[in-house]
Amino acid sequence: MFDCHCHFVTDNAVCFSAELLPDRIELPVQYELISSSEAGLDARYNDRIPMEKQVKILCGILEYAKKEAIPVSLHCVRATGLMLDVIRKTGFAEGMLMWHGFTGSKETASELGKLGVIVSIGPRYHGDVKALFEANGRLVLESDYEGTSRAEHEQIMIRHYKRCASELGMSIKELEEHCRETAKAFTDYKTAGTGKN
């Protein structure tokens, strides 16, 4: 099944890694090394990199990514307002940003939809999938799987697709096609322009 974000190497995933997060980032950031990446804001690491500095680093990463037409998977923990401000400030093209592991409200999803941001939900999303989809049709599914078992990864995705398809009144095949088409804008950026991916 199509998986928009995981840490497990699979042909069906758009994003694999988490290389530019506040708990792992190397300073100063070497922008020329950035390819399709996960970057973001995480209040849990405020003691290591204060939020003001995290915002500055993320803005730099996003400005570079925008200039080079590199898609970015956004990581956000307890910093939704700040992340929305950063997205508005950088003004990315539609489909070039994906908010991974989204667990927020339909109002936030709606605002992200207006900004052209893809919303990716994993099995940890316990909200109303239908209301979320109505708020932002740029919805994709992910596992955020960090293990190494193909069988476990597959079972996670099967359960996730079944639940979401049922809530959306779609077949699993229809939902998978929707996710592929929605993520296509994101994946097209990976192969266009720079030739980096």
Image: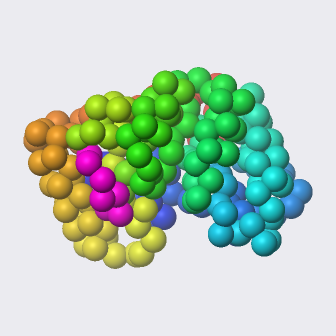
- Taking the image as shown, residue 55 lies to the left or right of residue 188, namely right
Q: Position of residue 11 (x, y in %)?
A: 38, 53
Residue at 28% across, 73% down:
152
Q: Which residues are magenta?
A: 123-129
The reply to whether residue 166 is in sight is yes
| Along the viewing direction, whichever of 153 and 40 lies nearer the viewer | 40
**Magenta-colored stretch includes residue 126:** yes
Nearer-the-camera pick, 2 or 113: 113
Can you give x and y, in whole percent of width and height, for residue 190 in the image?
56, 36
Query: Quick one: quadrant of the C terminus?
Result: top right
Q: Look at the image and name its color scheme.
A: rainbow
In depth, the one of 69 and 24 nearer the eye is 24
- Residue 121 location, x and y as percent? 37, 51
In the figure, 8 relative to 102: above or below?
A: below
The number of callouts visible is: 0
Give the left or right position of residue 56, taking residue 179 as reference.
right
Query: In the rendered image, which quarter is residue 28 located in?
Result: bottom right
Q: Is residue 12 visible?
A: no
Residue 185 coordinates in the image, percent (x, y): 46, 29
- Residue at image location 58% in from the left, 54% down from the top: 76
Q: Main secondary structure of the magenta part?
A: loop
Which residue is at a point 37% across and 32% down the rendered structure image? 136
- What residue is rendered at 22% in x and 68% in y? 155
The question of residue 58 being in magenta is answered with no
Residue lying furthest right in this view? 28
